[in-house]
Image (spheres, rainbow, N blue to C red):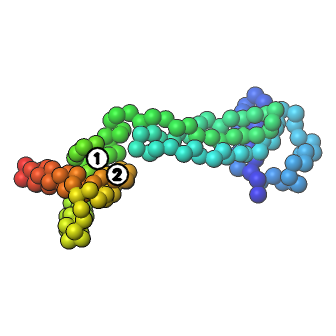
Amino acid sequence: MNKYTIYHSTEGVLATGKPYPTDEGAEIPNLAPELTLLLEVTEARPTYDSATHKLVKDEVNYNTIDKTATKSWSVVALTQAEIDERTPAHVDIGGIKYDTSETSQNAFTRMMTLVSNAGMALTDEVSVKDCLGVSHTLTVEQFNADMVQFGLYCYTQFHA
């Protein structure tokens, strides 16, 4: 069921989210000329990268000509402080932000054991996800080198 906004030509919005009392689209009998019934329309939310942007609700656009009250959103870039605040604890090794949580440390240890026990060649490829969930593909040789740096970093943090 559609919802409507009752809009006054000089006072603005009088009510929102009202069900229409008669057939959809029919004129309201004896409606005061300064009042307009606006169909509430919600635009689809745009896609965006939540690591670098945020979604901000726009002001409702009241269009008395088309008789709509449109709700929409804008994508706004995050400040560096907001990005830093949203990024989990990590260490950047070769452009990959490795999550340094205990859970991730355990997962990387298990992955190293699997790669080693599977006898993978140094030129084989493996995939890892960074602290933001972005997948990176690298060779076993690079993965092993990264994991040594990762382990040393986590060790120094533990003993700091």
Identity of the residue drawn at 24% across and 65% down: 120
Residue beneath disc 2: 136
* Residue 107 location, quadrant: bottom left
From this viewpoint, which residue is outermost toward the top?
Answer: 10
Numbered badge on residue 96: 1
Residue type at mark 2 is His
Q: Quadrant of the N terminus?
A: bottom right
| Element assignment for label 2 | strand
Residue type at mark 1 is Ile
26 or 43: nearer the viewer: 43
Numbered badge on residue 83: none
Q: Are marks 2 and 1 in contact (CB under 8 Å)?
A: yes
| Element assignment for label 1 | strand
For residue 52, side relative to residue 109 (left or right): right
- The answer to whether residue 6 of the structure is visible from this angle is no
For residue 70, side relative to residue 91 (left or right): right
62 or 7: nearer the viewer: 62
Q: Position of residue 61 (x, y in %)?
A: 68, 35
Identity of the residue drawn at 76% across and 40% down: 68
Identity of the residue drawn at 82% across and 32% down: 65
For residue 103, side relative to residue 151 (left or right): right
